[in-house]
Amino acid sequence: MSTATKLRERLSTVTDPELEDDLVSLGLITDVRVDGDVAYVSLAFNAPLSPTEWHMCDEVRALCRGMGLEPRLYADVDVDRRVFPGVKNVVAIGALDAEAGSATVTANLATALSAIDARVGVLDLGVGVERVGETWLDAVDPPDLARERITPTAYRDVQAVALGRGLPGRETAPMADALFELALPQLLDGLEWGSLDYLLVTLPAGTGSMTRIVLDAVPTDGAVAVAPADADPPAVRMGVQKLTGVGATVLGVLRTVETQTEADESTTNFPAGVYDLEPPILGTVPLDVAPFAAAPDDAPSDGDRPRVPATVEGPFGRLAVAITDRVGVVNRESAAATQCA
């Protein structure tokens, strides 16, 4: 039996805690090669900074080293995007209520992801979304759609394009949907994002035709359903079902409150039975604070180790990590279904 075959057998002891099966049986180990004392292992992982994927990679490394081999791990996921090539994951932020604060959530989540070393972009298409408070995203000018190429605005390592405030909502313009449908292709055709780990897309308010237009034009890997914490559970449940109905894979429900004090008093880990939904509750975040998420400056660097923060703090920092893990689950489910088909 070759060393590569023996290693593959040992790798079958590494279990995906979310999919509840081993990586080999799931087809998530796509290739194992041994050259001398180096093991090259390819995995169908595509969620940078996901703690769950990080821990599984550490288990793979330990098994390689237990056989006297130096591990070299590689992500083997072919993301063929018709829109935005080079972007690994697209996550939609959808407001189930216009006052849910989805634009604020997008801005703070992007900053938190960037702080934990993710390459992040924001595409604000939040037409009709009420701007709760003011964030850095409000300072981003709408793009000039007449230009052949549109370059995102850089803000503290986050690339951003904001169209949501540049178009009227349907309450002020009867033809708003038509205007939006005409403007969106021009924007998408001209945009050049480059390489990103996560692109956050703020959806128009609600689950109507504008949201469907976006989801049809920009294939997403998942969506976060944002709702006020005091929203009636039946309304949240219906909103999630409608978001799913217009083509989104809902990663989870995020509850928002106005202040940090309210967030502290709220039950963050809401029982799933309250909403009677399969997607998990991602937590509760305040709309009056900036995010904080950071890794210590003296964290060891290892070129072979995935980029994972040593420390994450604050509600948006915790949300950022939760999002990377949920995206990882959805991606691995898809990869496993493809590999095992």
Image: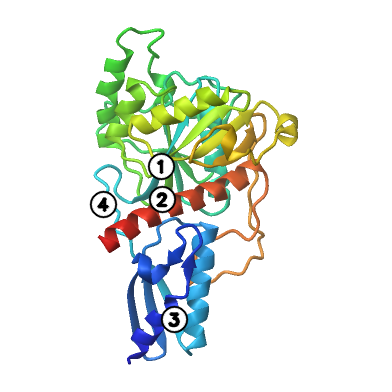
Q: Residue at x 41, y 24 (%)?
A: 204
Q: Are marks 1 and 2 in contact (CB under 8 Å)?
A: yes
Q: Is residue 48 above or below residue 267?
A: below
Q: Which residue is mark 3?
A: 10
Rendered-image quadrant of the C terminus: bottom left
Using the rendered view, name the quadrant where residue 1 is placed: bottom left
Q: Which residue is mark 4?
A: 80
Q: Which residue is mark 1?
A: 222
CA–CA distance in space, label 3 to label 4:
31 Å
Label 1 element class: strand
Tell me residue 138's x, y (percent): 52, 26
Q: Nearer the viewer, mark 2 or mark 4?
A: 2
CA–CA distance in space, label 3 to label 2:
25 Å
Label 4 element class: loop
Q: Callout 3, which amino acid?
A: Arg
Tell me if mark 3 has few (under 14), some (14-19) or many (20+) residues whose alpha carbon lies within 10 angstroms of its own: some
Q: Which residue is mark 2?
A: 330
Q: Is residue 196 above or below residue 277?
A: below
Does the image show residue 152? yes
Q: Callout 4, which amino acid?
A: Asp
Tell me residue 161's x, y (percent): 41, 33
Tell me residue 242's x, y (percent): 39, 27
Classify residue 18 as left or right of residue 319: left
Residue toward you, 114 or 58: 58
Q: Earlier in the sequence, mark 1 or mark 3?
A: 3
Q: Residue at x 57, y 41 (%)?
A: 282
Q: Earlier in the sequence, mark 3 or mark 2?
A: 3
CA–CA distance in space, label 4 to label 1:
16 Å
Q: Residue at x 35, y 44 (%)?
A: 193
CA–CA distance in space, label 2 to label 4:
16 Å
Q: Earlier in the sequence, mark 1 or mark 2?
A: 1
